[in-house]
Amino acid sequence: MDPKIKELGELKCLEGKLRIWMLQKVDDAQDALGANLEGMRDLKKFDLRWSDDAYGSLDERVFHQLKPHVNVCCLVIVGYGGSRILTW
């Protein structure tokens, strides 16, 4: 069974940097919401990566749910195929 992105929500004490690869494999935007990145106040850098050029409308919905905490100092986005960048 593949791990789901929502399992990150159980890791409440993460700090420093978090890199999430293969976001194109997230098949449910609600799973991305369950990751609760906004609640991870001790993370300072997020690196979000999609690894293919195939754009789907799900990319934007997943990206929308990955809103980081306001304490984030650096946000890296690679391979995102959406037509707009959200400002959260």
Image (cartoon, helix red, strand yellow):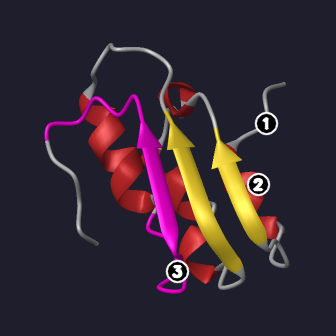
Answer left or right for 41 relative to 26: right
Which residue is identified by label 3? 69
- N-term-proximal mark, 3 vs 1: 1
Residues tagged 3 and 1 counted as in contact (Cβ below 8 A): no
Magenta portion: prevailing SS class: loop
Label 3 element class = loop
The answer, for residue 36, to whether it is visible in the render is no
Foreground label between 2 and 3: 3
Answer left or right for 2 relative to 44: right
Which quadrant of the rendered structure holds the C terminus? Answer: bottom left
Which residue is identified by label 2? 7
Residue 44 in the image, given as x and y percentages of width and height: 63, 74
Residue 37 in the image, given as x and y percentages of width and height: 59, 69
Residues tagged 2 and 1 counted as in contact (Cβ below 8 A): yes
Binning the other alpha carbons within 10 Å of mark 1 as few (below 14), some (14 to 19) or many (20 upward) gives: few
Q: Nearer the viewer, residue 83 or 6?
A: 83
Q: Amino acid at mark 1?
A: Pro
- The residue lying at 44 percent from left, 67 percent from top is 67
Answer left or right for 35 relative to 26: right
Q: Amino acid at mark 2?
A: Glu
Residue 17 in the image, given as x and y percentages of width and height: 72, 61
Mark 3–mark 1 distance (CA, rounded to whole Å): 23 Å
Mark 2–mark 1 distance (CA, rounded to whole Å): 7 Å
Q: Amino acid at mark 3?
A: His
Answer left or right for 33 relative to 80: right
- N-term-proximal mark, 2 vs 3: 2
Which residue is identified by label 1? 3
